Image (cartoon, helix red, strand yellow):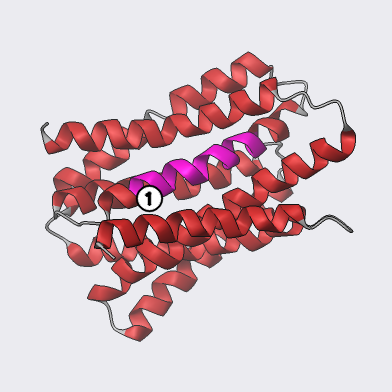
Amino acid sequence: MDLLVVVIISTLLAGLAMALGAVIAYVENIKNQWIEEEFRHSVMAFGGGALLSAVALVLVPEGIVNFSPVAACVWFIIGGLSFMGLDIYLKKINTPASQLAAMLSDFIPESIALGAAFAIGNSNAYLLAALIALQNLPEGFSAYRELNSSADYKPKKIILMFCLMAMLGPVAGVSGYLWLSEYPKAISAIMLFASGGILYSIFQDLAPQVKLEKHWAPPIGAVLGFVLGMFGLMVTSGN
């Protein structure tokens, strides 16, 4: 299969995971309130674990290769500050789509990095594609619930919107594949920028919502999400 087709399919499937997460939130109808709370918090924790594994196992290790320690830290911090600025702006305009904006803010640069990773033959490209899909699933779940709380957004409209947004993945991925493969520093900068933003999002949006008093199952979701990324890295490395 042509590598460009692989990039398109990989980024599209990763994007459609957002819509799948929305579908799960739409059909989820647990009668027991305690179990429902456990489930929702566990989903958010799983998403945090998957995001953390993408940062720790792929984006940061690949991103720091072409930079000095200081330059790498600068790009990472710029990413975190940029996501913070977006978060502050969304709060000021009082939009019900903060989770949606955060989801797209990390999905697009990750897709660009994924396309570039395929172009340069990076062995972790497939792992990165899987981790993007894993993180988009719970993010789609959370973003659906946030949008559905507003009367302006109907369930089917939200799911259709998520399906359309998935098309941004191939656009970003093909851009990275065709134009950034010859600029390794640009790829590394995007990876580090996305890493800083993702880490900010984990502790700003996901982690505070995970904890439940006298409930310990949700944090295990974070452990499981991270373990999936670790397992994938070990398998692709031949360990």
Q: Vertically, is 234 above or below 90?
A: below
Residue 64 falls left or right of residue 15: left
Residue 40: give x, y in percent of width and height.
Answer: 73, 40
Instruction: Say whether residue 93 is visible.
Output: yes
| Secondary structure mostly seen in the magenta stretch | helix
Horizontal side of 51 relative to 158 (left or right) equals left
Q: What residue range appears in magenta?
A: 128-143
Q: Is residue 130 magenta?
A: yes
- Residue at screen point 53% across, 27% down: 20
Q: Choose top left, top right, bottom left or bottom right for residue 71.
A: bottom left
Which residue is label 1 attached to?
110
Q: Residue furthest front?
A: 239
At x 29%, y 65%, the residue is: 239
- The residue lying toward the viewer, choosing from 67 and 23, is 23
- Residue 90: percent from the left, percent from the top? 66, 47
- x, y (%) of residue 207? 69, 59
Which quadrant of the figure has residue 147? top right
Which element carries disc 1, helix, strand or loop? helix
Assess whether residue 59 is covered by the magenta stretch.
no
